[in-house]
Image (cartoon, grey):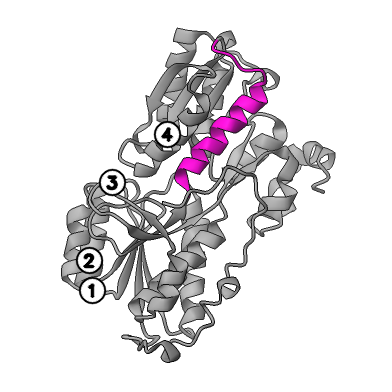
Amino acid sequence: MRRIAIAVVASSMSLSLAGCGMLGASEAGAGATPTRSDDITVGVLMPEETNTRYAEFDYPIIKRKVGELTDGKGKTDYANAAASTEKQLSQMQRMIDDKVDIILLDAVDAKAVAPMVQKAKDANIPVIAYDRLAQGPIDGYVSFDNELVGQVQGRSLTERIGNVSLSDKIIMMNGSPTDPNAAQFKKGALSELNGRVTIAKSYDTDKWSPEAAQANMTKAIQDVGKNNIAGVYSANDAMAGGIIKALEAAGVSSADLPPITGQDAELAAVQRIIAGEQYMSVYKPYPAMAEAAAQAAVAKVQGRDIQFDALTRDKVDSPTNKNIPAKLVTVVALTKTNIKQTVIADGIYKASDICTAKYKAECRALTLI
């Protein structure tokens, strides 16, 4: 797999293949003939509702892009599993029964969904894994470089602590054990933390639950001591919110909170970053990933192999399949210093969304308003 070097890079919302000279190429000249017209249906299966990004960003962008690529004729069929494996399997079976043309799958449980992926293949319905690498005979994978996410989180945490040593105790709040991305985030983070700090407590958090993260953090505070925690690795923003609640309940003031990481650049997390309660999040440019997924889905179902290959030049391995064509999008460490250059510049949030009355003073200090 091509790996992307750790770097804080400027994000770009324009996803174009013009630079590689592929997307604008004539398929007819290459002898390729689309197998379907623009009248297609793309099934979109999202995993849960705790993280607001799926409904607010990923799906709307996919829907819009499918429409653009098919002259308004293409449709999307959307379902969210609300963190239930059984519900997602039922939703996918319905899409197979309805004979959608292709499925974009963000799996609740990457292993449990494999037989259903095989069912789709048997029905000649391609499946592209989205965000999380599903097992089974998937046709492609569009996501972020997940180990890089963990590396950015781990490195940001150690840099914020400064002059780290093994005397610095870190609490790790990892994601759901059924989500393969969580294991990659954890691996990336440990590559930055192991041998440099002490992991005092580490938890895998069922269903990425903020409530479970809060409960686990409460236990960690009792065992380690609230004044002995140098930093907290939180795999995402929703759990970071629960972690902060646990620390505040233990009597830690907002000014004395240890540095806490996150991921997803949720609005509440951006506001916590401005207020100094959460140190950083990982901003993943959802428009870039969602547009790439829509482009790959349309290209795949229409038989436009040149476009599909140009979009999926990376390769990844799952426990069941090797050399899966993939598109891995890079990520950005989001702190106070680059809010204007990232989530605001990319149109994810307006300054007015972030700078509500509670955060006006901090926003002015950062020249966001």
Secondary structure, mark 4, is helix
State the CA–CA distance, disc 2 to disc 1: 6 Å
**Part of the protein shown in magenta:** 145-166
**What distance separates the C-alpha of mark 2 from that of mark 4?**
35 Å
Q: Is residue 159 magenta?
A: yes
Question: Tag 1's secondary structure?
Answer: loop
Q: Determine whether 284 is above or below 104 in the image.
A: above
**Image mark for residue 187:** 4
- Residue indicated by mark 3: 109
**Which residue does the numbered mark 2 point to in the structure image?**
94
Mark 3 in CB contact with mark 4 (< 8 angstroms): no
At 48% from the left and 84% from the top, the residue drawn is 72
Mark 4 nearby-residue class (10 Å; few <14, some 14–19, many ≥20): some
Q: Check disc 3 and report its element: helix, strand or loop.
A: loop
Q: Amino acid at mark 1?
A: Asp
**Mark 1 = which residue?**
98
Whole-number angstrom distance, CA of label 3 to CA of label 2: 18 Å
Tell me if mark 1 has few (under 14), some (14-19) or many (20+) residues whose alpha carbon lies within 10 angstroms of its own: few
Name the foreground residue: 10 vs 173: 10
Can residue 28 be spotted in the picture?
A: yes
Q: Nearer the viewer, mark 3 or mark 2?
A: 3
Rendered residue at 82%/49% (across/down): 369
Mark 4 residue type: Lys
Labels 3, 4: front one = 4
